[in-house]
Amino acid sequence: MSVAFTKEESSETAAETMLPDRPVSEHPNLVTLSGLKKLQAELDSARAAYEAANSVEDVNERRRQQAAPVRDVRYYAERVRSAELIADPETHEAVGFGSTVTYTRDERPAQTYRIVGEDEADPKTGSISFASPVARALMGKAVGDVVEVGEQDLEIISIA
């Protein structure tokens, strides 16, 4: 039978359906409870997208639509599996994983961030990764301490 009459994928289609894995950080996969729930929700969403793509009749189009969900399922399944749940700090005497820290930086208005896992960090909504330079500098410090990040000094105003 001629190739023109088969539904075999072309090399271009094959390349489109094999997306590279999402990069995984070399840091431990520390998460808060809300971060673990978010990872599980992302995994569930990726699985649902994969199942939805299964209903596409054209084999090449189905593979194209499954590519991103398959990659995401692999990533989130591994992140859920490797997650190390860290309880919120019991005291607010020193900055730790899960702490919400308010600090000032070089005459700018005070900034407040919660220190969380890498997958749940979103500076726009007030959370930064524990692996970020700012979080690493703040960890273990107390109210009134000043730390240097780059060429700027940060003074801790409060820890919650």
Image (cartoon, rainbow, N blue to C red):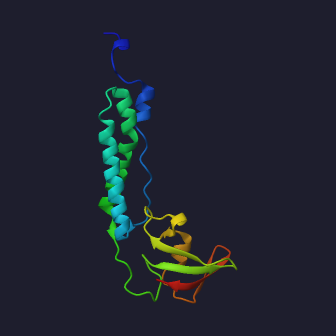
In this rendering, the answer to whether 24 lies above or below 48 is below
Question: Closest to the observer: 48 or 151?
Answer: 48
Residue 54, position as x, y percentages in the image: 30, 35
Question: Closest to the observer: 68 or 81?
Answer: 68
Write the residue at 37% across / 78% down. 88
**The N terminus lies in which quarter of the figure?**
top left
Residue situated furthest top in the rendering: 1
Where residue 156 sits, quadrant-wise, is bottom right
Residue 35, position as x, y percentages in the image: 38, 65
Q: Is residue 113 left or right of residue 149?
A: left
Write the residue at 40% across / 30% down. 14
Residue situated furthest right in the rendering: 107
Question: Closest to the observer: 143 or 78?
Answer: 143
Instruction: Say how many tags the image has.
Output: 0
Question: Closest to the observer: 23 or 56?
Answer: 56
Residue 94, position as x, y percentages in the image: 47, 86
In this rendering, the answer to whether 122 lies above or below 142 is above
Write the residue at 39% across / 67% down. 28
In this rendering, the answer to whether 12 lies above or below 101 is above
Residue 136, position as x, y percentages in the image: 51, 75
Where residue 154 sits, quadrant-wise, is bottom right
Write the residue at 34% across / 20% down. 7
Q: Is residue 154 left or right of residue 95?
A: right
Where residue 55 sits, quadrant-wise, is top left
